[in-house]
């Protein structure tokens, strides 16, 4: 393994640890603060979700560069596909968080963001499971 490969592997793992972990915490915290109707925290979590969501693209990019000529391997193809699915779900979580914040800001007692809360919680859980499946693929199916 060359120095460049080791550097790419280090960047790939570092981005995975320092972006996916916090992103998972942020997405799992959003429903709690919708229920508490804490708009300040929700605005902060929404912003952090966007920042960490964009930074997770570094995991994907460094993984692509590291994979090089092996991108046809089944475990890499499945991992990349799952990553894209998770990214789409994160966009939906961001959209629903925005809707929940708007509902809470309107002070309408009939719309307190309950629909968005359940959807965000479900999607956040699925995204966390996707990260775990990708981790299993990377560890146990990497030759």
Image (tube, rainbow, N blue to C red):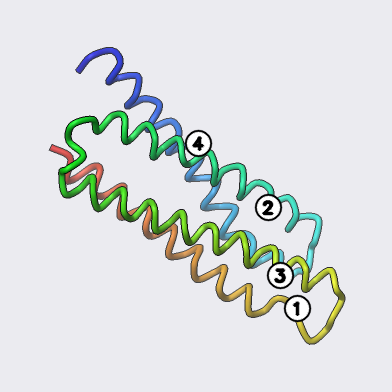
Residue 99 sits in which quadrant?
bottom right
Q: Residue at x 31, y 29 (%)?
A: 65
Closer to the chain start, of discs 1 and 3, is 3
Tell me, yes or no, whether the two marked residues, 1 and 2, touch with CB atoms within 8 Å: no
Tell me, yes or no, whether the two marked residues, 2 and 3, touch with CB atoms within 8 Å: no
Assess disc 1: are there few (<14), some (14-19) or many (≥20) residues with their C-alpha within 10 Å of its C-alpha. Answer: many
User: Which quadrant of the figure contains the N terminus?
Assistant: top left
Q: Is residue 7 above or below residue 100?
A: above
Q: Residue at x 25, y 53 (%)?
A: 78
- The residue pinned by badge 3 equals 100
Q: Where residue 107 sits: x, y (%)?
A: 87, 76
- The residue pinned by badge 1 equals 112
Q: Residue at x 54, y 46 (%)?
A: 53
- Element carrying mark 1: loop
| Front tag of 2 and 3 | 3
Closer to the chain start, of discs 4 and 1, is 4
Assess disc 4: are there few (<14), some (14-19) or many (≥20) residues with their C-alpha within 10 Å of its C-alpha. Answer: some
Closer to the chain start, of discs 1 and 2, is 2
**Which residue reaches farthest bottom?**
110
Q: Depth check: give the residue in front, 40 or 5.
A: 5
**Which residue reaches farthest top?**
3
- Element carrying mark 2: helix
Q: Residue at x 61, y 50 (%)?
A: 49
- The residue pinned by badge 4 equals 18
- The residue pinned by badge 2 equals 45
Whether residue 116 sits left or right of residue 20 in the image: it is right
Separation of residues labelled 4 and 2 (CA atoms): 16 Å
């Amino acid at each position: 393994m060359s120095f460049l490969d080791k550097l790419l592997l280090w960047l790939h793992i570092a981005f995975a640890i320092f972006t996916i972990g916090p992103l998972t915490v942020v997405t799992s915290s959003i429903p709690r603060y919708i229920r508490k109707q804490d708009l300040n925290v929700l605005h902060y979590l929404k912003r952090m979700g966007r920042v960490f969501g964009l930074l997770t693209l570094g995991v994907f990019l460094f993984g692509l560069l590291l994979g090089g000529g092996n991108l046809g391997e089944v475990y890499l193809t499945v991992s990349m596909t799952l990553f894209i699915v998770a990214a789409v779900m994160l966009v939906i979580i961001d959209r629903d968080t925005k809707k929940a914040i708007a509902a809470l800001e309107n002070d309408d007692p009939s719309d307190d963001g309950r629909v968005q809360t359940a959807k965000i919680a479900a999607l956040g859980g699925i995204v966390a499971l996707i990260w775990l499946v990708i981790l299993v693929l990377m560890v146990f199916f990497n030759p």
